[in-house]
Amino acid sequence: MENGEKPNDNKSNNNNRGIMIYLLIRKFYIADSNMKAEYRVEKYTDNVDEANKFLSALTLLEDNQHITWHIIKHDFNEPLILTKEVA
């Protein structure tokens, strides 16, 4: 690398700082069971309008009462923690 920089310098690790991404989370949960909820990231984007459109489409298409969809925003400054609404 130029100027003696290593690929794992802090500069390369901070590239995502300040960028907001929106995660579309699929939550599968059966309320009357002992099973814990299952979560999966279905899509991610840096555009909130795209995230909302995708969420609307998924919500309209989903016919399973045990599956809900959520948008979680994350900016890489802190660990990702699900809100009570999602969890």
Image (cartoon, rainbow, N blue to C red):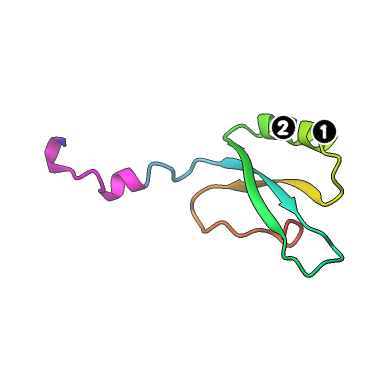
Q: Please state the extent of the stretch shown in magenta in the rendering.
A: 2-13
Q: Quarter of the image holding residue 43?
A: top right
The residue singled out by tag 2 in the image is 54
Q: Kindly give the residue lying farthest to the bottom in the view shown.
A: 34
Instruction: Tell me if residue 55 comes above or below residue 81 in the rendering.
Output: above
Question: Is the residue under label 1 in contact with that under label 2 (CB below 8 Å)?
Answer: no
Q: Is residue 30 left or right of residue 12?
A: right
Give SS at disc 1: helix
Camera-side residue: 19 or 36? 36
**Residue at 62% over, 45% down:** 41
The residue depicted at 78 percent of the width and 70 percent of the height is: 34
Q: Quadrant of residue 59?
A: top right
| Place of residue 84 in the rendered image (x, y in percent of width and height, measured from the top left) | 74, 62
Q: Residue at x 48, y 43 (%)?
A: 18
- Of marks 2 and 1, the one in the foreground: 1
**Amino acid type of the residue that numbered disc 2 sits on in the rendered structure:** Phe
Q: Is residue 60 magenta?
A: no
Give the Cα separation between the discs numbered 2 and 1.
11 Å
Please name the residue shown 49% across and 50% down the image. Answer: 76
Can you give x and y, in whole percent of width and height, for residue 1 in the image?
A: 16, 37
Q: Position of residue 60 (x, y in %)?
A: 84, 34
Residue 23's disc is none
Residue nearest the observer in this picture, 40 or 53: 40
Above or below, 65 against 53 in this view is: below
Q: Which residue is mark 1?
A: 61
- Circle 1 packing at 10 Å, graded few (<14), some (14-19), many (20+), is few
Q: Is residue 31 left or right of residue 19?
A: right
Check the picture and name the quadrant holding the C terminus: bottom right
